[in-house]
Image: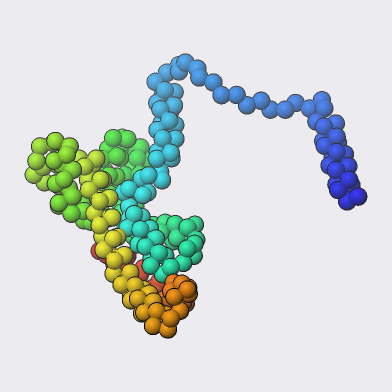
Amino acid sequence: MNTLRILLLTFILVAALSNAAVGQTLPRISIGVEQAENAQELSVTLQILLLLTILTLAPAIIIMLTSFVRIIVVFSFLRHAIGTQQMPPNQLLVGLAVILTAFVMAPTITRVNDEALQPYLRHEITQKEAYDTGIKPIREFMLRQVREKDLALFVSLSGIPQPQTPDDLPTHVIIPGFVISELRIAFQISFVLFIPFLIIDMVVASILMSMGMLMLPPIMVSLPFKILLFVLVDGWYLIIKSVVTSFH
């Protein structure tokens, strides 16, 4: 009976809305491509297309040009080292990594805003000048973190002449070298994180074998001890401090 009442009330509501809409003019939305009458209209159209392209590539830009790679890889290895399958959840780890990325990149973002974005919005510089000025702080950040060995690899793969100064390095060579270096440092930090938890697993497995409890999974017994160890040493504080200070 309750279901029939809900269906009847829904039908009455839809009928009432339909009657109310009769005789009223509804807006029509249309998208078209028309010929530009002057160069200014064409410039605005190209700017909109450029903005949509940047918004589409924004996730890749955040991942590849910032500290996000190192932070999220360390967090993922930490979860595997402790042994929790989905705790903390992926959304929480990604959100924390984004917040820490914004914190680490704040000086660089501030320079880009003050030296490139704001002058461009005030029409003091052109788009090309804004790009050339805004990419410099990002290049400097990547060059501080990248290894010369990784840069040399992509310089040789690209076949460009040997650069004499960092300014001679193309941006498309710096980015992959930066990502490779970030992965290397993240794996180094993760290896150090694994050692104490691995010791706990080995100790628990040895105790269970000596007691003849072969059917009991060691990871089930060691998990509470690993969580307790992580809490007692204030693990999140130490990890976040180590990761953030590794960029200085």
Q: Quadrant of residue 144?
A: bottom left
Towards the viewer: 130 or 124: 130
Q: Position of residue 207 (x, y in %)?
A: 39, 82
The residue sitting at the right extreme is: 1
Tell me, what colour scheme is on the image?
rainbow
Report the quarter where the C terminus lies. Answer: bottom left
Q: Quadrant of residue 67?
A: bottom left
**Is 231 located above or below residue 123 in the figure?**
below
Instruction: Classify 23 as above or below 105.
Output: above
Horizontal side of 246 relative to 92 (left or right) equals left
Give the left or right position of residue 178, taking residue 39 as reference. left
The residue under the point 44% across, 31% down is: 48
- Direction from residue 107 to residue 96 in the image, left or right: right
Residue 219: x %, y % from top left: 44, 72
Q: What count of labels does the image hold?
A: 0
Q: Residue 87: horizontal and vertical position, in percent? A: 49, 65
Residue shown at 25% from the left, 45% from the top? 176
User: Looking at this rendering, what residue extends furthest in the bottom direction?
Assistant: 211
> At 42% across and 84% down in the image, what residue appears?
211
Residue 22, visible in the rendered structure: yes
Q: Nearer the viewer, residue 148 or 51?
A: 148
Residue 100 visible in the picture: no
Residue 92 point in image, percent of width and height: 48, 60
Query: In percent of the image, x 88 and y 42: which residue is there?
Result: 8
Residue placed most toward the observer, 188 or 206 = 206
44 is higher (above) or lower (below) than 77: above
